[in-house]
Amino acid sequence: MATGTLTLLANSRRLTVTTILLILASETALCQQFLIPYQAVSDCGVERFFDIGSLSCVACGSNQRASETGLSCVCQAGYRILTTNGAATTCQICPTDKPVVTKDGFGCIRCPGIVTDEGTCHCPKGGILVERDVQGNLLDEARCEICNGSGPAFSAPNSNGDRCERCQASFINTSLSCVCGQNNVQAGGLCFPPNSLPTTVNSNVNFAQLALPIQSAWFVKNLYSSSAACLVFSNLTACQALGNMCVMNMHSLSSVANDACGLFNSIFRSTAALGSTQDIAYWRANLPWLFYGDQPGLASRVLQTDPLTTGFSFKGSNKNIDIKLRAAVYNARGEFLRWDKIGGGYLQLCPDTATRQQAAFYFGTAYQEKCDLSVAELLRVYPEPLFYDVFVDVGGGEDTRLLPLPTLILNQQYNGRFINQESMKNWYLSRRVFLVDTLSGREKTLSATPKVIRVASSITIRFQLVPATQKGQVFTPLMSVSYSDVLITDTNTQTVPVSFAVEYEMDQHETRLKTDTALGVMGGVAVLHSLLKTVSWKRRTLSPNIDMETMLRFLLFYAGDLANVFFIITVGTGLYWLIFYKTLEAQQFVSVLLPLPAQEEQFVTYIGCAFAFKAIQFLHKLIQQLSIDVFFIDWERPRSKASRTFQAASEPKRDPSPVSIWRTYFVANEWNEIQTIRKISPTFQIMAVLFLLEVVGFSSLALRDPWSTLKRSPEAYTPPYSLTLRYGLAATLWLCVGLLQVIFFTVFHERFVEDKIRQFVDLCSISNVSVLLLSHRCFGYYIHGRSVHGHSDTNMEEMNSNLKREAESLCGQRGLLPNTDTQTFQVSINNHLRAQYDRIREPLSRRNGPSRLVDASSANPFEQSTRAYNTLNRFLGSIIDHANRDIDYIVKDKLLFERVIGMEFLEPGEKSIFYNDEAHSFSDVLFYGNEATLLIFDTLFFCVVDLGAQSFVLAAVLTYIQQMVFRLIRNSFGRRNLASKTLVDQRFLI
């Protein structure tokens, strides 16, 4: 019993230990790294083969060696296959009486002739090897049967050398046997009669961009045979192959007659008797159609004479927006492969979604796709080129009609000239294109890596609208192709930029003529208007002579007027295209198309001119506003202090209290604050325009397609922007938002909320301070602020009492003339008044001028300035009160025509002239009165930045910064000018 228990315990312990060891071993295996040795096929040598199952070299069996591929074993020479099951093979040596192995490797036989290095029989040229009888029994000795190359058999060994077949027809037709005669020429497996072609052909492919001719292995092998077969035997495939080689040589023609295109043209001329195909003179029978002809002006006749029979429409039952193209596809050997419908990614090398690529074939959508392609990928995907003859499907129901699509190869050379890069009259239109050529650049052998590849780096299909069409008709489209020659250095790192585009254009001659006419007419009007401004300026400055300053003023005025002309023309042009192109859906047929980017250059130049001239006008006005003469006339006079009720007998009599300067400071500060107020809110202007463009989606209206949808699907193709539409859209929105703000400000805000201009006039009246503004030497504005109560320097109770009396019409009116309310005037002063004004202000000018002009003998310059200020105040007050008989003025109304042209007909003589001005035109010296100039300048600034950066957000940010900078300049320098002209310390101008 005890022994059994001990045995059971020992077995249990052994089981536990074994389990623990197995667990540890499994964990060790799970943590182990699995490594295998790297072996290639070339590492296996002759006695081993590469086992694709284990990726290693495995020894061959007895009497075996590795096959040519190195992936299996074969019997050694002199050994036949005894047994094989696919995985293992047994080899047995052949007996001495039959030492040679049959071709299938399973039998031994005697040879009648030569034994090859592989240990098999070989027959002489023209013979086939026979090793078995007709029942398949192995012969004791192989036989060499000579094929009968004479008639009527005309047989020759097949490619495997085991059967006699009828030889190629060219041998029979040329030599009446299967042997090409001594005088004949054998090439490409064909036999040609002598003198069919030049004895030698030029097998070079000229890569002109690299200045590198390469002897192409493909041309060496096929050029002569294809040319000869095409010429002698009218072989259709050979003719197509020859045409393809000409296409690979860029359709280039020169004095060399034995290159691909030279041979093609020689055959084209020599086969004129065969006639043409499809009633097309340029399409010779049996030959591909490669060229249109070299007649001068032929390109314009082909492209701009006959429109397509079908029209394009964007709506209705006749809606037609699909561009239907078809292509006949050939391989490099000239074999016809198929007819293809062109759409989606067809002809496009750049990868993209089918939806986006299909947009290229919707009429009216300017399509452009660019990318960089890997050379290694091109070599993998395009081992040899395909060739396309492209046609336009013009419909016709069941009887579909095709229109050949002319092609312009920009790399094509004619006697060394790139003729298709010149004017249209020299163009040489052609047919047939390829996308990628990795074949012609191979040297020596066709299996070698090409030295150079040629890629269609730019393909553009262009449609031109028939002028004045009402049926949406277009002329024959044109496909332009530009190829890039790529010298192969490192295929893994090299890339090629490629692009595909579809463009639409219409004749812009009439549009340019109308624009130039409008520019000429309006420019002439601008000259007259600028002359009027110059004459008005001379009258207001009383300058009798025409000097350099006069000419400069004229040029400055003309810059502003010309800026308005350019602005009106450009905005009108942009709005025209925006309306008539983007609303084409409201038309039955296409009648207008957007100008191409190259055609927009003149338009962009006009925008640049408008901005430059408007900037000059804006700076001119800014400088004028920063240099005006300002003076505040204080009408307040000293008043005796109110006497006490009981005054001590010994108390001396009090002097009149001085006039407080705070009223003048207050008016000056208010003037300083209204210098930069505008009729619009710049911040709201920018935010509103940006909201409409980017959030609402109005920016989609500037895309180069006819659709007016504001929201686009992310998966849909987004065409490039039109500069014309982009400018027209941005300018129109900016002006509309600005004008709406001006209307709201003028109609509602100024009437019901706040009118700071009229409030300033009221402030002058309450403060008993008048304002004289001289924007010119002898012209300016006067704000009559004399209080009807005689004084304003009083306490709150008396001020409220005065305002109440005025509200109840218990006092006189505020106007300069009795019983009138007119407080603002335009003033035209004479020379005498101006001279007196300058003479009195001279100490102020010296004080604010350079220190070298200050009188050093003056003990206190500030006292002199104060005296000058008080003198000028009394002098101007006396003028207004008609207290100076030598310097007086009259008050009158301006004529309507004077107000329209902005010029006074009467020059001030002995008396100055005050013109009633209920329009408060003194705001002309403020930003407020120049809102039109500011609005146009902001519009142009926003549009110019956007056209340059193609970003509405950036344009908005920079426009806001520009507004803030010029506002800061106007405030800062305006405050300085106000302080220097009125003796008000800048510290009080807050």
Image (cartoon, rainbow, N blue to C red):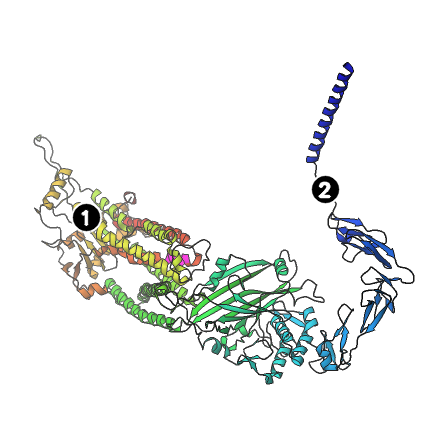
Question: Considering depth in this image, is 624 or 835 the residue closer to the camera?
Answer: 624
Reading the chain from its start, which is encountered first: label 1 or label 2?
Answer: 2
Q: Residues within 10 Å of mark 1 (few under 14, many from 20)?
A: many
Query: Mark 1 or mark 2, which is nearer to you?
Result: 2
Q: Is residue 707 above or below residue 35?
A: below
Give the residue at mark 1.
Answer: 764
Q: Position of residue 706 (x, y in %)?
A: 40, 63
Q: Position of residue 352 (x, y in %)?
A: 52, 57
Quadrant containing the N terminus is top right
- Specify the farthest residue to the top: 2
Q: What is the total number of numbered labels drawn onto the structure image?
A: 2
Quadrant containing the C terminus is top left
* Amino acid under disc 2: Leu
Question: Considering depth in this image, is 258 or 575 the residue closer to the camera?
Answer: 258
Residue 373 in the figure: left or right of residue 525: right
Q: Which residues are magenta?
A: 940-946
Residue 841 highlighted magenta (yes or no):
no
Mark pair 1, 2: CA separation: 98 Å
* Amino acid under disc 1: Cys
Q: Position of residue 916 (x, y in %)?
A: 16, 58
Residue 945 highlighted magenta (yes or no):
yes
Q: Which mark is residue 35?
A: 2
